[in-house]
């Protein structure tokens, strides 16, 4: 076996070990995403598109999701998004979300995704939140 072959086998083994270690790390320390759904009256026409939006979010590897509406929590961190039955009711009050921002799961989340059709002028959310328009 020549020196080039030995070097190649060593490089493949080293990169394989690094990839396996990183995979194990990500399996035990997944990214936490909090999905917030605006369930106000103006969202009534947009809620039928919600399952497609959630499927697009759920396709990420090494990620666990918690889900809440602007009114109440739906589920804590798990591998899948389970919205159950989400109905539009009551006026829009996105300010209530900011009041809960220091509580779990807000403080545990690496990323916060807000699904709302509110105008940008109404969305006075923290800068690290991502807003998806349905």
Image (cartoon, rainbow, N blue to C red):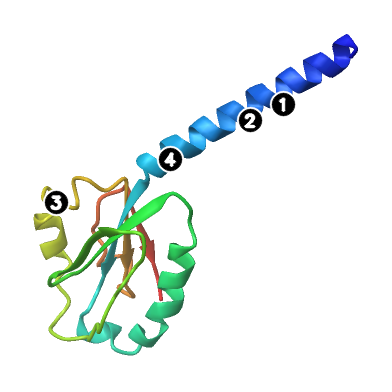
Q: Earlier in the sequence, mark 2 or mark 4?
A: 2
Callout 2 touching callout 4 (CB < 8 Å): no
> What secondary structure is found at the residue carrying circle 4?
helix
Residue under pointer 3: 104
State if disc 3 and disc 2 touch (CB < 8 Å).
Answer: no
Residue at (80%, 21%) from the top-left corner?
8
For label 3, the SS is loop
From the top left corner, tell me how far across and down residue 110 is, in percent.
31, 45
Judge depth for marks 2 and 3 and give the one in front: 2
Q: CA distance from mark 4 to mark 1?
A: 21 Å
Q: Secondary structure at mark 1?
A: helix
Q: Is residue 54 above or below residue 49?
A: above
Residue 12, numbered label: 1
Q: Residues within 10 Å of mark 4 (few under 14, many from 20)?
A: some
Nearer to me, 50 or 125: 50
Cβ atoms under marks 3 and 4 closer than 8 Å:
no
> How far separated are the C-alphas under marks 1 and 3?
42 Å
Mark 4 vs 1, N-terminal side: 1
| Depth order, front residue of 120/101 | 101
Q: Which mark is residue 16?
A: 2
Circle 2/circle 1 CB separation < 8 Å: yes
In this rendered view, identify the residue nearer to me: 97 or 67: 67
Earlier residue among tags 3 and 4: 4
Residue 82 falls in image quadrant? bottom left
Asked if disc 4 and disc 1 are in contact, CB closer than 8 Å, the reply is: no
Residue for badge 4: 26
């Amino acid at each position: 076996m020549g020196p080039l072959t030995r070097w190649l086998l060593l490089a493949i083994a080293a990169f394989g070990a690094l990839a396996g270690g990183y995979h194990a790390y990500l399996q035990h320390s997944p990214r936490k995403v909090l999905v917030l759904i605006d369930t106000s009256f103006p969202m009534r026409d947009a809620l039928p598109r919600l399952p497609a939006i959630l499927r697009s979010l759920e396709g990420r590897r090494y990620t666990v999701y918690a889900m809440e509406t602007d009114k109440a929590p739906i589920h804590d961190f798990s591998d899948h998004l389970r919205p159950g039955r989400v109905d539009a009711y009551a006026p829009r009050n996105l300010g209530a979300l900011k009041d809960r921002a220091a509580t779990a799961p807000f403080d545990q989340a690496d990323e916060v995704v807000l699904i709302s059709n509110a105008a940008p002028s109404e969305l006075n959310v923290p800068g690290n939140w991502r807003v998806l328009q349905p």
